[in-house]
Amino acid sequence: MSPSETAEKTPTGYTLIIPPGWARIPLREGTKEALERIFFTHLDKVPDGVARDDAMRFRLELRKQLEKRARAARRNGGLDLYLPVRPRGGTLVAASFIVAELPVGGAEQAKAKHVLDRLAANAAGPGATTRELSGSRAVRRESRVAAEPGRELDVDTRRVEYVMPVAGNAENWLSISFSTPGDGNLDSDFTDVLVELFDAVVGTFEWRYE
């Protein structure tokens, strides 16, 4: 399909290439099936150092982690949740990203659309840059969020968000939001690698037309 043809069409979805050890969990439908598949495909073995008697408990705890992340992502309006599913050091890497649709049509969303338009035009705001993704101009923003003791966010996190209009549909925008506490140090090499990995994955983004 030529650029002129895609410019007149609204995509039916998107594609991303994710690294080995990561999985996609759809949040609108098929969530339970995806979790079951991950549980039996990726969590069938436990890492060295976990006693055989503790294997089932270990697997059930990892499953609870996955289910908890999926529920939280769905509450936040996500379309898909992506996260590591291969244990590292006896636990899952604490990182994930959510793809979500952002409706900005109508009077109630006029202010939000104005802000997004300004960001897309000028990359306004601290830590904001622009990047071309599958013909759409996306705004990339990076931030740090402090822990809120006693609430769901109990650790400091480093976040990166891409926001862009859906091709051919000015009424909807798409966000791809990444969050990680890294290894507990938001400035460590390990945390930097996770952020770089996310940016590389986003670089594979393509609108899908059918």
Image (tube, rainbow, N blue to C red):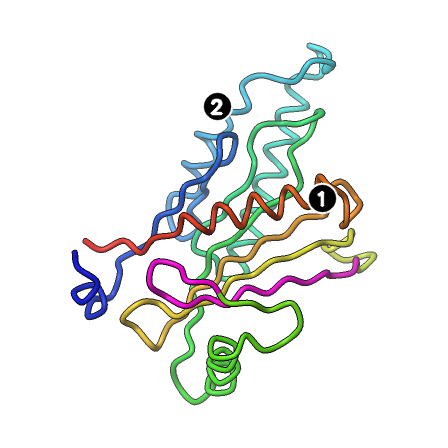
Residue 30: image tag: none
Nearer to us in this view, 120 or 159? 120
Find the magenta span and give its range.
Answer: 131-147
Residue under the point 73% across and 55% down: 153
| Left or right side of 143 for 167 | left
Label disc, if present, on residue 40 of the rendered structure: 2
Q: Position of residue 66 (x, y in %)?
A: 58, 39
- Of the 4 image quadrants, the one containing the N terminus is bottom left
Above or below residue 36? Residue 1 is below
Instruction: Give, as a three-letter code, the residue at label 1.
Output: Gly
Tell which of 39 and 11 is nearer to you: 11
Q: Is residue 130 left or right of residue 49?
A: left
Q: Is residue 42 above or below residue 127?
A: above
Q: Do the residues under discs 1 and 2 have CB atoms within 8 angstroms? A: no
Q: Position of residue 48 (x, y in %)?
A: 69, 13
Left of 91 or right of it: where is 102? left
Q: Mark 1: few, some, or many residues within 10 Å (few <14, many ≥20)?
A: many
Q: How many marks?
A: 2
Nearest to the observer: residue 197 or residue 82: 197
Q: Residue 133 magenta-drawn?
A: yes
Please tell me whether mark 1 sits on a helix, a strand or a loop.
loop
Q: Tag on residue 182?
A: 1
